[in-house]
Image: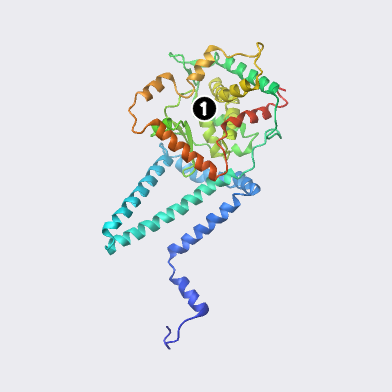
Amino acid sequence: MTETGAPITGEKARKRKWKRLSGYWKWMGFLLVVDIILTILAKIPKVCDIYTDHIFKIWLETYGRVTALFPFSVGEIMLLLAALVVMIWIISVICLIVWRKSRKYRRYMTRYSKGLLALLLAVVLIMTLNCSMLYGCSKLNVNGHRGEDYSSGEIRKLWNYVASQCNRLAFEVERDDKGFPVCGGDRNRLLKQAMLKLSVTYPRLQGMYPDPKPIRCSYLMYQADCTGVYFPFSLEANYNTYLSDLGYPATAAHELSHLKGDIYEDEADFMAYMACIGSEEPFIQYSGYLSILGYLQKDYAESGQYSTEDAWLFDQVYEDYNNYYYTQETYDAIESTDAIFEKETVEAVSDGITDTYMDYYDAEPNYEEVTKLMLAYYDGILY
């Protein structure tokens, strides 16, 4: 009412209602609109390509440099805190049944829920910027090839080449007193050099590389059959501490490729392979060739092209491959540990989350398609 008693109507009433609206809800509305717009843009490949090549790298060069200063995984801490925040909210909702008449407690619940809503919208924003936009990119073209069918004879030639490289490197790498391959230098420094060397061909890989970080809860990663993980909230590459030294270079390069925008698993595997085999360190080269050996051997076997003239893997290569992700010693130690959760349960939950995640992004955990990328790369080189 005005001083004269006349009601406020029309445009003045709408302005007054807007002024009364708290700053919190204005910000939530703004975040929601931004999330919706970016979600729509994430469906346009050309927009996603431009974003990934020119904008996404800014976050790594700024925010990523800050998280890289911490010796521990910031992303792991974030996940633990997020789980704690949600758990507290659930408990608080249950307690509301008892203390629903308390004005002070209702005020606390309102503020906590509003904070949780803000956190949720921020999570959606970060996931859109650091995941959805990357999944919306055009698929990788290798030497102008993508999705072409190759003959069994070409798969055979690729197998022979990779197998011969494994046989050669098995006796070139340095080994410790237990017979395990060891790196002849600082593995992270050598790996970063290899990634930057590859960036001449694939410019998306240019820029700063943080050191991959170990996960303290690696036992759960082992149970979930996971050796490495990319955290979009902290822009970090992380690895399972149980991972063998030989499996580390290709696994770390795979996660570092995610940091540069190659979010699809086959493309990250391919980039890891290319980076490793391009290193001057035989140990890292060997890790790269072994990383795709299982995929290639499967495809080679299915091609029906076995011949007595083909390259056969030496016993030493088979031994190294069997210890590639976890050495037998590490495996025995892990299996002797009393688990809080059953491995099957953790693996089922992990698979469920992965399936939901992939369905949301309309993607597939297409690790085995790395063979197609390799066939495209060696087209004109081996055949």
In this rendering, does residue 236 appear at all? Answer: no
In this image, 137 relative to 121: left or right?
A: right
**What coloring was used for the rendering?**
rainbow
In this image, 210 relative to 205: left or right?
A: left
- Which residue is pictured at 47% across the width and 20% down the height? 323
Classify 73 as above or below 185. Answer: below
Classify 175 as above or below 67. Answer: above
In this rendering, does residue 185 appear at all? Answer: yes
- Which residue is pictured at 61% across the width and 49% down the height? 43
Residue 38 in percent (x, y) is at: 56, 53
Residue 216 in percent (x, y) is at: 38, 34
In this figure, which residue is indicated by the disc labeled 1? 249
**57 or 78, which is in the foreground?**
78
**39 or 96, which is in the foreground?**
96
Residue 82 in percent (x, y) is at: 39, 46
**294 or 341, which is in the foreground?**
341
Quarter of the figure that contains the C terminus = top right
Secondary element at image label 1: helix
